[in-house]
Image (spheres, grey):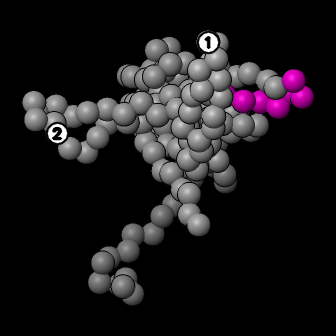
Amino acid sequence: MINKVVLIGRLTAQPELKKTANGVSICSFSIAVQRNYKSADGTYGTDFINIVTWRNTAEFVCKFFMKGQLIGIVGSLQSRNYEDKNGNKRTAIEVIADEAQFVESKRESANTATEPQTFTAPPVAGGNDVEFEEVEDDDLPF
């Protein structure tokens, strides 16, 4: 059977890292995903989807993502039953994320994030004196 979810959306709040009693990292957050079609009043609807990440993925999300940033999520859909404070039975449906990815450039995300970001380019292997050979389209084998 297949249970695969792929989403791109904006974080609705600043993600926070928590630890279980055994010291395992966990991060729960939600993303806002815009629908691909307009409603009768001409606006796009938005779905708010709960995401749970564990271990390294949780630490990655909390370290590198902020409220308002676009994030790509790959995972599986999971439902669970629980009782609320008043003893009512509830069902939660959430995405358990196996992967979290950057979707926008650092510059674009700085315009939407709640805190300023800086970017330092990594050094280029072999230095900056790399020369490229120009190839004409006629010489390409495809």
Q: Residue type at mark 2: give it.
A: Lys
Numbered mark located on residue 86 in the image: 1
Q: Where's residue 89, x and y in %?
A: 60, 26
Q: Which residue is farthest bottom?
A: 141
What residue is shown at x 42% (from left), y 36% (from top)?
A: 9
The one nearer the camera, 117 or 114, is 114
Q: In this view, does 119 lie above or below 138?
A: above
The one nearer the camera, 57 or 103, is 57
- Image quarter of the C terminus: bottom left
Disc 1 residue crowd, few under 14, some 14–19, many 20+, Cα 10 Å: few
Magenta span of residues = 21-27
| Front of the two marks 1 and 2 | 1
Decide which of tag 1 and tag 2 comes sooner along the chain: 2
Q: Where's residue 50, x and y in %?
A: 52, 32
What residue is shown at x 55% (from left), y 18% (from top)?
A: 14
- Image quarter of the N terminus: bottom right
Can residue 119 be seen from the camera position used here?
no
Asked if residue 22 is among those painted magenta in the image, a careful observer would answer: yes
Q: Where's residue 137, x and y in %?
A: 30, 78
Q: Name the residue under label 2.
A: 38
Q: Residue type at mark 1: give it.
A: Asn
